[in-house]
Image (spheres, rainbow, N blue to C red):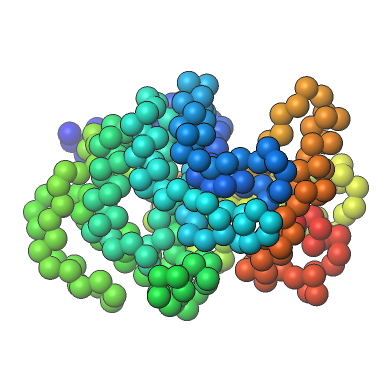
Amino acid sequence: MNSSATATAQTVRNAMNNANALKLGFFGANLSSARTATSAPDRWSGSWKDCLAMAKVADEGGIDFLLPVGRWKGYGGETDFHGSTLETITWAAGVLASTKRITVFGTVHAPLFHPIIAAKQMVTADQIGEGRFGLNIVAGWNEGEFEMFGVAQREHDERYLYAEEWLAVILKTWTEERPFDFDGRWLKLKGVSAKPKPAGGTRPLIMNAGSSGAGQSFALRNCDAFFTSMTGARIADVTDEASIQASILEDTAAKVAGVKAEAKSYGREIEVYTQGQVICRPTQREAEEYYHWANVENAEWPAIERMLDLRGVTRENTPKDAYARSAV
């Protein structure tokens, strides 16, 4: 395949093999309770049986992608929110083997996976899915999880420098036909040989969700997609629902435009992804009632407070109304 054809094939792959301007996916299905910290009895199980059934419905229904969360321990509470999880690359391989068109990501903590092993795992999943695997890179996150592995997290900005070196090795294993050496700051590798390559002469779509300046810069330099929160920056300044929604929409549009403009300063194009909670009920009133019942009346507060604390948001340093909105 010549370079022009390869570039075209990669563009098609990054577009998840369709022309949909708005891509829709399911986020966090590999986790118990998925993305809702609730003790509601009908919360998501995260079991393989349910994941497989969900994936087949999503594939047949036209959903574009499935994005799992890399999680190694729960957040506590009555249900131990996220206490039961399926590892994401092997999860993706199973899903890819059972679907036909949907893109399936693996979410990989760069400091916990040796790049040669990770590259081989991801190529295996990509071969199974005939070019439908995607990589979501995590540079560092939950201190308690890293302690489980006996791995100390690097200083914040240095995490992304390591992730960039890690990704450089991954990309070389996916593209170099001859054995190569790698002499990096952290990774010293000799005679690296890796076959086969990703499917179709292309490579997996690469995503990152770094929220800091260093994280966003890493994503814009190295990734095809940037996953970010779209909570309105001025939510704390407004109180009525209509104003909150207007603020979120305005801030979201500005943030997406800013991310894309900054990517162009690196000579690159990037897509922007975010998350939201969808509740389907016959009427608006029933949807709102269920939302309140699941997210407020049955909220897993110990787990929610633990997650907020990891982001530096506490009851002591945040206005009461803003804290409540952050939690739900």
Identify the image quadrant of residue 95. Answer: top left
Residue 71 lies left or right of residue 113; in this view the side is right
Front residue (pair 183, 313): 313
Coordinates of residue 161 in the picture (x, y in percent): 39, 70
Of 240 and 62, nearer the camera is 62
Q: Is residue 7 left or right of residue 260?
A: left
Residue 42 position by quadrant: top right
Residue at 25% across, 37% down: 127
Identify the residue at horizontal 33%, vertical 31% (top origin): 97
Residue in the image at 81% along x and 42% along y: 293
Q: Nearer the viewer, residue 50 or 129?
A: 50
Residue 63 at x, y = what percent? 52, 28
Quadrant occupied by the N terminus:
top left
User: Can residue 9 be seen in this snapshot?
Assistant: no
From the viewer's perspective, is residue 199 above or below residue 218?
A: above
The spot of residue 309 in percent (x, y) is: 67, 69
* Residue closest to the eye, 28 or 206: 28
Residue drawn at x 49%, y 28% as measured from the top left = 53
- Residue 23, position as x, y percentages in the image: 53, 33
Query: In the drawing, does residue 216 fall left or right of residue 37?
Result: left
